[in-house]
């Protein structure tokens, strides 16, 4: 068993084509603080799980607590980050590791030691490098993508700031590492081939988010600005990472009236390079945890990536946590990890699919939850909490990894790990697959037609066959 801690959501871009593999973790504001165990045997399958669908080809043991995953299409490897700390006994300081998997078979080819608190990963296929963020010791490990060997460890956590995510921009040969100390944030720019620090951009808030436009080397930095007596606003800075220059700053429309009281916080952002649009999800986050869960709406802004002009603003249900782009379908998939309508018995994760051109919501899916039940000292607390999202653009499918929790006792939650397959054209849920337990990451290997899902509690990775996930778009 383990206790979940608040972490920041890494935005991972794999290769030039911006195949998003949003790995691993939730924003700190959305952390549940609960441990998760497998359910007791009850003689029936978990609620909502289909008997057929994407086949779990194998389950691979990779370490203590695997999290974020990134895929290198060129070397046909998947890189799985293990945090490397014994959360069961509260021991911190152990080095993390990266397991290198064959993307076709899922076999573990090599395990490499990295820094302390490893929790995010990105691949630059052009440079042949893998970058692993080590939050606890303020460093980034640079690995050879072909061999998995560590080539260099770069210190990026200056002045008490810790790296919280990593984004690779193969087009300009730079890697962007946002850092935070809880009070302020910065962006460290590394050279993709050498791992050397090229620039450090300061002056941001602590809840910094980053995305890149692979067409022309623009970077987008999401931030929250709080003004005394004037509430808060979410902002986007368009940055030239090569020169370290901010081209322009855009203030987004308020997510809701609550932005006058609580920070209007950007949870995730991503670029559709085909249409030249930037998609940003944000919400006014604050108050009690139960208030956050109960239906706080989010705004999704679609901006012109070149000029920063806001083209559309759409309100979606729930506190948005992660988003990903399906460029083939022209869709943005936005997931609220846990939202409850007033009076509803369960907290359900909500998946909203938006048309990027018009900003119109094309479909909404609520992930399944277990039926209310009782079990001795455990309290019935059914909810579905999303932990990661990955998109398969070839088949038009989004893979939403979540924890289907049934019971609660203190820090211990009883439930199952599942993956919902959602059609990115219609927003319709195709099916649900049972995997292991615990929060983790996910990624799609397009060439090998595989989906990788890490199971933090089990210390494993589930390897799914994407070819049977469904044919085309419905």
Image (cartoon, rainbow, N blue to C red):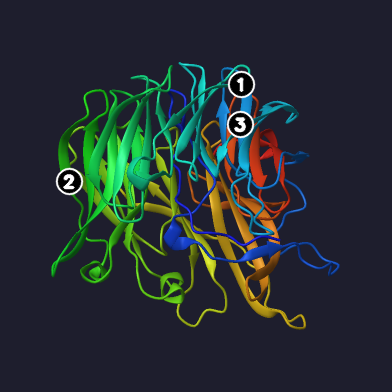
Quarter of the image for residue 39 reads: bottom right
As measured in the structure, the alpha-carbon distance from the residue carrying label 1 to the one carrying label 3 is 12 Å
Q: Which residue is mark 1?
A: 149
Say above or below: 292 vs 171.
below
Q: Is residue 411 left or right of residue 141?
A: right
State which tag comes first along the sequence, 1 or 3: 3
63 or 446: which is nearer to us?
A: 63
How many C-alpha atoms fall within 10 Å of the one at disc 1: few (<14), some, or many (≥20)?
some
Circle 3 is placed at which residue position? 79
For marks 3 and 2, the one nearer the N-term is 3
Residue 235 image point, x, y percent: 22, 50
The vertical placement of 232 against 15, above or below, is below
Residue 428 picture location, percent across and down:
54, 52
Q: So how many labels did they put on this image?
A: 3
**Marks 3 and 2, how far apart at CA:** 35 Å
What residue do we see at 30% from left, 42% from top?
A: 186
Marks 3 and 2: which is nearer the front?
3
| Quadrant where the image shows the N terminus | bottom right
Q: Could you tell me if residue 269 is visible in this image?
A: no
The residue shown at (63%, 24%) is 77
For the residues labelled 2 and 1, the Cα–Cα distance comes to 41 Å
**Callout 2 touching callout 1 (CB < 8 Å):** no
Label disc, if present, on residue 250 of the rendered structure: 2
At which x and y percent is residue 130? 52, 26
Relative side of 279 to 407, left or right: left
Mark 3: give few (<14), some (14-19) or many (20+) Cα within 10 Å.
Answer: many
Percent position of residue 205, x then y: 27, 51
């Amino acid at each position: 068993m383990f206790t979940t801690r608040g972490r920041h959501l890494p935005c991972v871009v794999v290769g030039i084509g911006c195949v998003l593999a949003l790995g691993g973790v939730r924003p700190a504001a959305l952390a549940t603080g609960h441990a998760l165990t497998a359910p007791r045997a009850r003689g029936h399958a978990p609620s909502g799980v289909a008997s057929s669908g994407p086949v779990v080809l194998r389950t691979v043991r990779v370490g203590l607590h695997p999290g974020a995953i990134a895929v290198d299409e060129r070397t046909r490897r998947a890189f799985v980050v293990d945090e490397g700390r014994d959360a069961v006994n509260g021991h911190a300081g152990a080095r993390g590791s990266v397991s290198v998997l064959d993307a076709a078979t899922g076999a573990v080819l090599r395990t490499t030691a990295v820094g302390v608190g490893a929790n995010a990963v990105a691949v630059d296929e052009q440079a042949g490098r893998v970058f692993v963020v080590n939050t606890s010791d303020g460093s980034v490990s640079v690995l050879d993508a072909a061999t998995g060997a560590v080539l260099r460890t770069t210190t990026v956590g200056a002045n008490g700031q810790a790296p919280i995510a990593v984004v690779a921009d193969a087009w300009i040969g730079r890697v962007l590492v946002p850092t935070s100390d809880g009070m302020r944030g910065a962006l460290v720019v590394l050279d993709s081939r050498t791992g050397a620090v090229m620039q450090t951009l300061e002056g941001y808030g602590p809840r910094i988010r980053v995305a890149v436009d692979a067409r022309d080397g623009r970077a987008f930095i999401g931030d929250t600005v709080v003004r005394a007596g004037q509430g808060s606003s979410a902002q986007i800075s368009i940055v030239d990472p090569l020169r370290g220059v901010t081209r322009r700053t855009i203030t987004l429309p308020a997510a809701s009236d609550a932005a006058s009281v609580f920070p209007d916080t950007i949870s995730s952002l991503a670029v559709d390079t085909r249409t030249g649009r930037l998609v940003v999800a944000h919400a006014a986050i604050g108050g009690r945890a139960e208030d956050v869960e109960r239906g706080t709406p989010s705004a999704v802004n679609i901006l012109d990536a070149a000029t920063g002009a806001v083209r559309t603003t759409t309100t979606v249900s729930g506190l948005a946590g992660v988003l990903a782009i399906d460029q083939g379908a022209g869709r943005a998939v936005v997931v609220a990890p846990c939202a409850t309508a007033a009076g509803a018995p369960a907290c359900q994760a909500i998946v909203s699919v938006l048309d990027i051109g018009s900003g119109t919501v094309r479909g909404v899916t609520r992930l399944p939850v277990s039926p209310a039940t009782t079990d001795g000292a455990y309290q019935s607390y059914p909810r579905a909490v999303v932990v990661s999202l990955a998109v398969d653009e070839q088949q038009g499918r989004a893979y939403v990894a979540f924890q289907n929790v049934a019971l609660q006792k203190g820090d211990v939650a009883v439930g199952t790990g599942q993956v919902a397959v959602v059609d990115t054209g219609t927003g319709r849920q195709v099916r649900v697959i049972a995997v292991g337990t615990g929060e983790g990451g996910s990624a799609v290997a397009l060439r090998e037609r595989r989906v990788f899902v890490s199971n933090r509690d089990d210390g494993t990775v589930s390897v799914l066959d994407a070819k049977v996930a469904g044919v085309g778009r419905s």
